[in-house]
Image: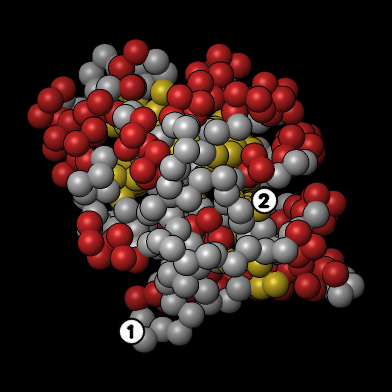
Amino acid sequence: MNVVDYLRISLIDRCNFRCTYCMPDGDELSYVLQQDLLTQTELLTLIREVFIPVGFTRFRLTGGEPLLRPDVVDIVAEIAALPETQDIAMTTNGFLLVEKAQALYEAGLRRINISLDSLKPEVFDQIIGNRGRSRWQHVWQGILKAYEVGFNPLKLNVVVIPGVNDAEVLELAALSLEREWHIRFIEFMPIGNHDLFQDRGWVSSEALRQQIRSHWGLTDGSVRGNGPADVFQIPGAKGTLGFISQMSECFCDRCNRMRLSADGWLRPCLLNEWGQLDLKTAYRAGVPLADIRQQVQELLALKPEINFKQRESGAKGTTYSRTMSQIGG
Ligand code: SAM
Ligand code: SF4
């Protein structure tokens, strides 16, 4: 059976961007109130007393935008210092990396994924919902800063949307040529902005690979990570290309992860809400940690079954009622 040892932790559901593919148009999202976020102490207690004892050893901090959390560097330092931690990584939009990359590295973070959906400032700003001064340059500086302080692997995430950034696939792939950067193309999922998904559709990883293969050729590659990316390399490139194909392939049988939301819900599967546990409420109500541990252990045993729930016709609590920023992408 697949070992589930990887926890994606959302530190905050808020974000300083409003990416068109991640959040719905127009509507105001409801955010978790400050008092409902897991505090640093609560999070660390749950990691030490619940998650590590049941077998989790690899952690990714995400959001929303994890760098908006004022205590993010301390959280990284505490998780990195736990002897059981085998890996700690982060997914960020990169806007605050110029200021924070050095401190994060010194705190023990070594792996970072930064979203970069376009190399064209105007397209980038349109994607992130920015109407003010362009933010592209600052994100780019953040990426360079992360590279300079030594993050390795440094991965750049691209969600490919037809008619928005699909014409840039070769330019984005070319970022892997000269530097040890790992570009990961993610298939657009109908989570967050259903209207955009309906309007634009999605591009399969195989279609992207064909385009890249016919331009440069592609060989098998490898890069350290915990995820379901298929990894390739342009011959002679320093970095790699990863493809995350959750629309065109099913890797539910290989799933090794659970997600903890910023307000303390433990979610076994991204694509459905079955079996979720409200750990924060249990913890604050004084439920003994041994009992919470037991509940998580039981949920782990159910995970293989829950992974396939979204395919059951009419399954309640199914798929996409929360955005990636709310679940912790
Ligand atoms: N704010 C950070 C960022 O953007 O990297 C971390 C959180 S974000 C929710 C995590 C990842 O989810 C990003 O790489 C983003 O591109 C991806 N994502 C969000 N909505 C998505 C969607 N509908 N389909 C595919 N990927 C999505
Ligand atoms: Fe924010 Fe990340 Fe969602 Fe963009 S993808 S809105 S940066 S959480």
Quick one: label 2 or label 1, which is nearer the N terminus?
A: 2
Label 1 neighbour load within 10 Å: few <14, some 14-19, many 20+:
few
Q: Secondary structure at mark 2?
A: strand
201 left or right, relative to 142: left
Amino acid type shown at disc 2: Leu
| Residue, far front | 132
Q: Quadrant of residue 301?
A: bottom right
Q: What colour scheme does the image use?
A: secondary structure
The quarter of the picture where residue 145 lies is: top right
Q: Position of residue 74 (x, y in %)?
A: 79, 37
Q: Residue at x 32, y 37 (%)?
A: 123
Q: Which residue is mark 1?
A: 313
Above or below, comparing residue 158 to residue 181 in the picture: below
Disc assigned to residue 296: none
Q: Residues within 10 Å of mark 2 (few under 14, many from 20)?
A: many
* 91 relative to 311 in the view: left or right: right
